Amino acid sequence: MHDPNRPHRNTLFVEDAQILAQDSYPGKQYVLRVQAPRCAAHAQPGSFAHLQCSPELLMRRPLSIMGTDPDAGWVEFLYKDVGTGTHALAARKPGETISMIGPIGIPFTPDRARPRTLLIGGGVGIPPMLFLADRLRTDRHWQPFVLMGSEVPFPFHAQPSRFMVPGVPAEVIAAMPLLEDRGVPSRLSSRQGYPGCFDGYITDLARHWLDAMDDAARRQVSIFACGPHPMLAATARLAEEYRLPCQVSLEEYMACAVGGCAGCTVHINTPNGPAMKRVCVDGPVFDARTVNWSQ
């Protein structure tokens, strides 16, 4: 029987996922596509999977899901080679299989009363934003706008956007081709001087967009974000300043990723007072107002 207080129950699948593609990009970034039909059928934007990077490594690694095709049965991830596990994963080849658990976690929950959705992704926090944008675009009710920031080269070749976005400086035209093709406006931000990108923090670019709106338009805005802790904290402050709802996907080191080890706990303010919540199954998505950002 489904227990509404334990939504992660009966939603996890263990699959031997076959690698379909493994593409490399500058900055030691990789896009991995695997055949995992059960995960593909149940994944929601914000959920993640726990992968065994190599048969020789006992500990798995959590990776945010960037996209799925439930009909074809594949799941896609963007990750960066930063340690032993992801380095081993980067060496895996198409045709090999990876043990995978997923989908895991509480997803994003857009509010239909606020159709102007601002999606902010930083670094390896970009994948959930792409997944969410892809889901939102299938319903004309939503008006997603995606901002992506990175201090290493983006894992795609940026192109000038064909969408004019009020409030965005005229020289900021770099966009993600995949989103352009799908009719979703986007802009890129970096302090590395990449052509067409906003020169500054991604939250400063978001402020330009918000300041161009009148009060009625801003009341239709909600924010969704994933990325490094400082970026999420800055996004939470921005949302508080403009009195906007904001959901954030937190990233923490994980051992089991299924709620058993409590190694990924974070401080969350609840109606009953401060509490330690597990990012893996109580999150990874939380209301930004409830997160204790000083911890």
Image (cartoon, rainbow, N blue to C red):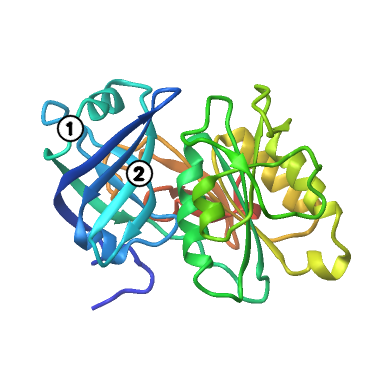
Q: Residue at 57% x, 61% y: name it.
A: 183
Residue 253 position (above or below residue 71): above
- Residue to which mark 1 is pinned: 93
Q: Are marks 1 and 2 in contact (CB under 8 Å)?
A: no
Residue 7: image tag: none
Instruction: Identify the residue shown where x is 16% and y is 53%.
Output: 14
Query: Can you tell which quarter of the image residue 220 is in?
Result: bottom right
Is residue 160 visible in the rendered image? The answer is yes
1 or 2: mark nearer the eye: 1
Residue furthest to the right? 214
Residue wearing tag 2: 77
Question: Residue, x 44% and y 58% (percent of image)?
Answer: 45
How packed mark 2 is, by other alpha carbons closer than 10 Å (few <14, some 14-19, many 20 or more), is many
Residue 274 visible (yes or no): no
Q: Marks 1/2: CA distance?
A: 15 Å
Residue at 27% from the left image edge and 48% from the top image edge: 260
